[in-house]
Amino acid sequence: MKYEFSENLQRGVLYLLKSNRGFYLQIVNLVQPEYFDFPVHARIFSIVRDHYEEYLKLPNDEIIIEEARKEKVASESLSDYEDEILMVNGLDASSLENPDYLLDLVEDFARKASMKEAIKDSIGLLKEDRIEEIEEKVRKALTVCRTVDYGQVYFPSIKDRWKRVFDEDFSDRYGTFLPSLNRVLEGGLSAKELAMVVAPPGVGKSLFLVNQSVEALMEGRKVLYLSLEMSEDKIAQRFDSVMALVPQTQLKTQQNVLHERIEQFCGRYPSSQLVIKQFPTGQATVNSVRALLVQLKNYEDFEPDLIVIDYLELMRPSREGMAEYQAQQRISEEFRGLAVENDCLVWTATQTNRQGRSVKVITDVELADAYGKIRTCDFALSLNQNEEEFENGFMRAYVMKSRNSHQRFIVPINVNYGTLRMTESMDIFEEEED
């Protein structure tokens, strides 16, 4: 695919590329040698790019000519390059006074070229039923652009920055059902963050996620609960008990009470919405979730504030052929990216290794298969419980990681195994012993 704009504009792009470092840095990732109409232009661009990558300086014309002498093909004459450099340097200065126009021109072309390339590649991938790779290629093509947000200039912005801090509305924080955590977190977690609950099998990860989801519903939020193991009806029955406070064993016999209390819940929190979706175990990728989000938005006008993924090990990474520890870290990174892309909070759960059952307090040492999966998350806690505590409906939540607040402390939790409701114990929470 060749540039659709004139030869002189292409020469203007080359001139700025070889002489203006700021222009070069903004545009180099959007340009491919094959985009230029003439092979000489393509080779000049390659020489400039390769020289900068090696020396972090733009080459002068003598260096370009010298490198062209080494790299030109037999059918080319060195005078072709010398003449072209003269033409590039001799451009009317007025045509170079608006570099932003050239930037926009190249950016628009690069976006179209990337999408066409993605569609072309997708034809072969579709025949091989490699749908996730198609989604990834198209998604990358949609992100092609030059960066115009250069971040925060520290010194001039200090007053404005602190004004934003003091004016921040903490009502938009995602509270947990544990008041002690909310106090430490200044109201709760934030959108664009990844939170993780860690426990051995059977201790209560899914139960924790349901209780956390109900807390979000009580804040009037839209919740998408993704199950990779239990059926949608089974998960819904857990929500029934936690929201209506009807024990699991009485859900069938207390239908009138259940319906009445759920109606009361909806009336009290009218803006809350809940969607429960089951994916086949080990089959769904983050791109499967992205596709679901598009469908929910287009057909149900539903855009979640909170996405719950139950749980990490039952997802499949978008890239195949990874070792287990690499796959789990990759999935964690993809979840974090999903939170940022959709401006929402993501809660998930993960397993411990075998030692997780034998230690008093689970730390990152007991993470199953991949320590790297906790690096990406913003907040992580473990659920700890021995046999005596289980019999008494008690467990300890240990804050393993909190990116922006206090960590390494324990919050005691009471668990009603009839209604499945989790609440913070009235006992004073303990600090971890050093």
Image (cartoon, grey):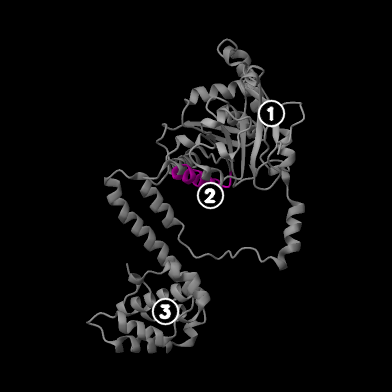
Residue displayed at 61% across by 13% down: 256
Instruction: Tell me the distance, in whole angstroms, between the alpha carbons under discs 1 and 3.
Output: 63 Å
- Give the camera-side residue of 56 and 233: 56
Res. 434 image quadrant: top right
- Report whether 414 appears left or right of 200: right
Question: Circle 3 is placed at which residue position?
Answer: 14
- Which residue sits at x=59%, y=47%? 192
Using residue 138 as the reference point, say whether residue 367 is left or right of it. Answer: right
| Residue at which label 2 appears | 341
Front-most of 338 and 294? 338
Q: Is residue 347 visible?
A: no
Marking on residue 268: 1
153 vs 21: above or below: above
**Callout 1 crowding tier (Cα within 10 Å): few <14, some 14–19, many ≥20:** few
Q: Secondary structure at mark 2?
A: helix
User: Along the horizontal axis of the image, is 32 left or right of 286?
Assistant: left
State which region is magenta.
326-344
The amino acid beneath tag 2 is Glu
Are the two marked residues, 1 and 2, in contact with CB atoms closer than 8 angstroms?
no
Q: Mark 3: which secondary structure?
A: helix
Q: Amino acid at mark 3?
A: Leu
What residue lies at 45% left-to-right and 60% top-to-bottom?
144
**Percent position of residue 110, x then y:** 41, 65
Label 2 crowd bin: few (<14), some (14–19), many (20+), radius 10 Å: few
88 is higher (above) or lower (below) than 245: below
